[in-house]
Amino acid sequence: PRGRKVLFLVFKGTSHMLDLLADASILPNYAPFVRCFGDNTSFVHQGAYHGIEQTVIRYTDELLEVLKAEQEAGVNELIVAGHSLGGMYAKAFALEVFLQTKGTSGFRLLLSESGRLRRTLSRIWRLVTGQPQPAALLAQNPLVRGMRCVTFGAPSICGAYPHGTGVRPDLVSFMRERSVSYVHEGDPSPRAWSHLDIEELVLALARRRLPLFLKR
C-alpha cells in the first residue's frame, strides 16, 4: 500500500528431516510462562518454541543488522509469517515478543523464585557481555515490538492444563491484536493440538510402547 514499507520475516514449513523432530516435539513446555509470570498452567509447543529460542540466540546480531538497514530505508512494519511448521515458528516468535514486552512491563511475578533466578541470570549475562540477553535485545527494536504475525495452515502452539482450560487472557488479547491465521476448511493439521489433551496423549503412547520396550 502507498506510504507503507513492510519487511517480511518468513519461516519455511517442514522440509528437512530435522524439521520432523520439531514437529514431533509435542511435549508441553511450561518454562517460559513460569519464568515470566509464575504461571504453571500455560504451555507452548516444545518443538516450535525451542526452534525460535535457538534462532534468536544464533542470529540476533544478523537480524538486528537487517532491521537497522531496513529502518534506515524507510521500513515501518514487520510481518512475521509462515506455513505449517513455519507458521508455528512465526507464532512462537510472536509469543517471545509477548513474553519480553509483558515480562518487562510489570506483569512478571517479581517475588517468585523463577523471577529472582531470571533477574540474576540476566544480570550475569549483562556483566559478561555488556548487553541484554539476545531475546530482550531483539525485542527492544521498534519493528519487533510492533510486529504482526500471519500464518497459513499452522497448528496452535499454546494451551493450558488441565485440558480445556482457557489460554491466558492477556496472551489471547495480544495475539488477536497482532495476528491472523488462515486455515483451509478441510485441513486437520491446524486443529490438531487444540483438539487433543497433549499430556494424556503422551501418557497413552508411553503406556502402549513401554511394555513392548521392556520385553526386548
Image (tube, rainbow, N blue to C red):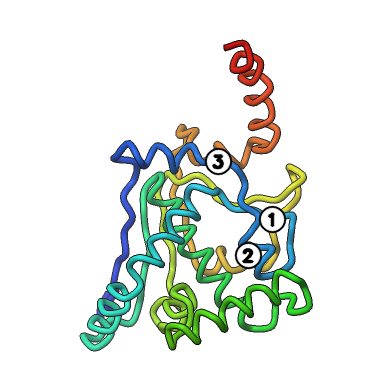
CA separation in Å, label 1 and label 3: 14 Å
In-image side of 156 versus 52 (left or right): right
The residue singled out by tag 2 in the image is: 171
Q: Which residue is found at the position 64% from the left and 59% from the top? A: 31
Can you tell which mark lies on residue 26? Answer: 3
From the image, state whether disc 2 or disc 3 is nearer to you: 3
Q: Residue at x 61, y 42 (%)?
A: 194
- Circle 3 residues within 10 Å: few <14, some 14–19, many ≥20: some
Q: Secondary structure at mark 3?
A: loop
Q: Position of residue 100 (x, y in %)?
A: 55, 74
Is 185 in front, or is 127? Answer: 127
- Residue type at mark 1 is Ser
In the image, farthest residue toward the top? 215
Q: Residues within 10 Å of mark 2 (few under 14, many from 20)?
A: some
- What is the x, y in percent for residue 160? 70, 51
Which numbered disc, 1 or 2, marks the residue that appears first in the sequence? 1
Q: CA distance from mark 1 to mark 2?
A: 10 Å
Q: Quadrant of the C terminus?
A: top right
Q: Quadrant of residue 162?
A: top right
Q: Front-most of 38 and 181?
A: 38
Residue linked to disc 1: 42
What is the quadrant of residue 65 in the picture? bottom left
Q: Are marks 1 and 2 in contact (CB under 8 Å)?
A: yes
- Does label 2 or label 3 sit earlier along the sequence? 3
* Label 2 element class: helix
Sequence-wise first label, 1 or 3: 3
- x then y, percent, for residue 184: 43, 40
Q: CA distance from mark 2 to mark 3?
A: 20 Å
